[in-house]
Amino acid sequence: MRPVNPASRGSLLEVEDLSVVFRQRGRADVRAVDGVSFSVSPGETVGLVGESGCGKSVTSLAIMGLLPKRGVRVEGGVSFDGTDLLSLPPDKLRLLRGRDLAIVFQDPMTSLNPVVPIGTQVTEVLTRHRGLSNGEAREEAADLLRRVGIPDPSRRLREYPHQLSGGMRQRALIAAALACRPRLLIADEPTTALDVTIQAQILELLKTLVAESGTALILITHDLGVVAGTCDTVHVMYGGRIVERAPRHELFAEPRHPYTGGLLASVPRLDQPRGVRLQPIEGSPRDVIPWARGCAFAPRCPNRVEECTPVAPELLGDRHGLRCVNPLRSDQPATKAVPR
Amino acid sequence: MNTPTGPAVPGSPGGPPDGSAAPGEPLLSVRGLKVHFPIRKGVLLQRVTGYVRAVDGVDLDVGRGMTYGLVGESGCGKSTLGKAVLRLVEPTAGTVRFNGVDVAGQSREGMRRLRRHMQMVFQDPLASLDPRQSVESVLSEPLRAHGFAGDRSRRVRELLDLVGLPAGAAARYPHEFSGGQRQRVGIARAIALNPELIIADEPVSALDVSIQAQIVNLLEDLQDQLGLTYVVVAHDLAVVRHVSDVIGVMYLGALVEEASSDELYAQPLHPYTIALMSAIPIPDPEVEERRRRILLTGDLPSPVDVPPGCRFHTRCPFRQPTRCADESPDLREMRPGRKVACHWAEEIAAGAIRAAASAHDPTATEVGTPSS
Ligand SMILES: Nc1ncnc2c1ncn2[C@@H]1O[C@H](COP(=O)(O)OP(=O)(O)OP(=O)(O)O)[C@@H](O)[C@H]1O
Ligand SMILES: Nc1ncnc2c1ncn2[C@@H]1O[C@H](COP(=O)(O)OP(=O)(O)O)[C@@H](O)[C@H]1O
Ligand code: SF4
Ligand code: SF4
Ligand SMILES: [Mg+2]
Ligand SMILES: [Mg+2]
């Protein structure tokens, strides 16, 4: 295993001020992603975290060019190894997607073709993008299935997606994504639908992949525990924007944004003694105000002050980026739950 | 969770069923419970070709005012067990005693009267609420059905207050609420008749992370206020550990371990619990880096073909050449308060038998015999 130091390499993917607006007939536009910037280097795992609806999946679909053309406006820049993906002609992008870029979704059923055997779906990628013969492709496909922990791969290759359990389908999908040896893999809630014992297997697999082949990984999740064990850099999203970003250890040791701190204080931890009361965030993710009228988190924020509206704070700071005018102080017990 | 202070609120609709429960007897007592679903083939004859052994012989006791947590992977039979306790599915075998009363022996009318004391809270609050019914009507329906004598709309306001919703919520419809608020409505409905036992099936898993804590806290507060007894079914062991006094770990229809929440965390004894616990991510990078993960291989065997011997032996990283594959371990009391169904629990606890490999070992994914 070759240790990869992300800092020693240039970034592979640069997302610059990305915005995605959905136009809806007769209703106001929805700005699902709003000025998101981040970069990923080879061998680096970057986490995008946030609750449902905060724009994680739309960000990944925009990067991959998988959003519908009609009714959607994508602005900003996405540069992959120097190539601007947003202006790339569809056929060129498709070629790149099969070879250098891959994505794994939460629900494997939506991305596997239900009437084509698993094996064919993996070998197709190998023959099309890597020019292998059918025989070579079958051998390599069996090997990939074995690597993702699918027992009895030669039998499984002949089976259809519905014959596999959820965990196996997700692993088959990862095998298909790995088939082209992508340089960038986006995993969008790859384990959310799975049991934790299967989740542990899949996360281990992704970690090995990053360490062994230097793949750049964007891991999208709502689970802070998953982030804590896997990501080098973490971007916390709220209402379509990044509100805090930091190297993993720093983010968990000293969360500065009230939303990040609130999330950490609200989830029960397995290693936490019982009788410790959880500290929920008030309200619901529905209670947002548009960024045009101030900080979107203001309606739920315990640290809210006058300056939070009507002008939204900027994301400031290089290493530890923060979008907040009144962040948590290190002595503020936002992440420390009080005894019941 | 604190021991509750008193019995049901005065003026509540009906007291507890006059069972023959001896003092100190658990409120809920389950023995040898089985739920087997027949698998039928053929259009006309509907031949039974096998059984899904969803619940396959479970014993458990839940003390009054306690919270019993049930954890396990999807398909292991948690929900079916919960439903069988309430007789929402008919058990194939075994007994359920609630407050000393044999639930299976109840007539339809007896069951109806019993059910007001045992209520269920479901995972998806929207699916269990009728979209055309206002909250007022959702909440007063059980009151009407069970002949609540008092002022129904006053009781509805009282219930809304208990679950932290404004009185104005009564006139609104379920779809107008957020997920967390809908779950509050679901909980208000469950407590409407002042039940003693609430079975909460994945009460927070459909909710956003930041909302889950609100509902967990609400359930805890209501238990303290109303003296409720809970069975909480969830796949999230961190949530279950947080709310439960006692935890039962299920695997393929059977309990494989039972212990107090703190002891289970301090030292899991069954290999499945050990693996499950090690797989749960903890939101702290320092802790994550120090942890040793026991990876399982293979998939959950189908509940149609439960493996012979120990039902976990096809995936067990501690499996031994003798006994595991051919002798079924009983759930036995290894130490006071610690029940485990494993032949080798003592040796594993003492460190004399180790897991075949760990996550840091590149061969980790080869551990154990994959089931297929
Ligand atoms: N239609 C089918 N034909 C043949 N085998 C099947 C079929 N459906 C499921 N299986 C097999 O049955 C086993 C259990 O599958 P099931 O989908 O019930 O698993 P699961 O409990 O959902 O697993 P997971 O936790 O990984 O999601 C697997 O070995 C699977 O391959
Ligand atoms: N009505 C039914 N008919 C046939 N099989 C069922 C039925 N309900 C549940 N099962 C099966 O019983 C097993 C346990 O189900 P369930 O209790 O819902 O699991 P859990 O809640 O732990 O996810 C599963 O294999 C499931 O497919
Ligand atoms: S800017 Fe204001 S409202 Fe927004 S997170 Fe910071 S303190 Fe809270
Ligand atoms: S009895 Fe054997 S197979 Fe079963 S849990 Fe114990 S060690 Fe593992
Ligand atoms: Mg998503
Ligand atoms: Mg269930």
Image: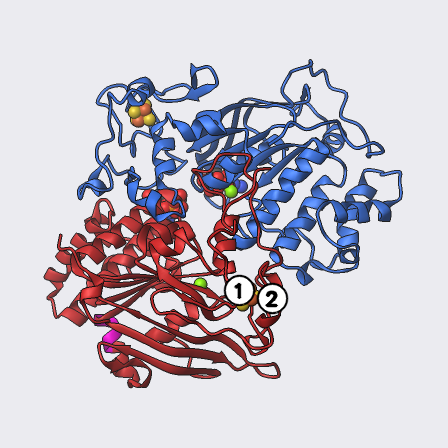
Amino acid at pointer 2: Val
> What residue is shown at x 61% (from left), y 28% (from top)?
B66
Ligand 1 resides in the quarter of the picture at top left
* Mark 2 → mark 1, Cα distance in angstroms: 7 Å
Chain ID of residue with mark 2: A
Decide: few, some or many residues near mark 1? Use Cα within 10 Å; few <14, some 14-19, many ≥20.
some
The residue nearer to you, when weighing A276 against A224, is A276
Nearer to the camera, A306 or A51: A306
Colour of chain B in the image: blue
Asked if ligand 3 lies within 8 A of label 2, the reply is: yes
Residues at marks 2 and 1 touching, judged by CB atoms closer than 8 Å = yes
- The chain in red: A
Distance from mark 1 CB to nearest ligand 3 atom below 8 Å: yes
In the rendered view, tell whether residue A300 sits above or below residue B369: below
Q: Which residue is mark 1?
A: A326
Q: Looking at the picture, how far across and down is residue A213, in whole percent?
A: 17, 60
- Taking the spot 33% from the left edge, 50% from the top edge, the residue there is A229
Q: Does residue A76 appear left or right of residue B23 in this picture?
A: left
Mainly helix, strand or loop, the magenta region? helix
Please state the chain letter of the residue tagged with numbered disc 1 in the rendered image.
Answer: A
Is residue A36 visible in the rendered structure shown here? yes
Query: Which residue is labeled 2 in the image?
Result: A305
Q: Label 2's element?
A: loop
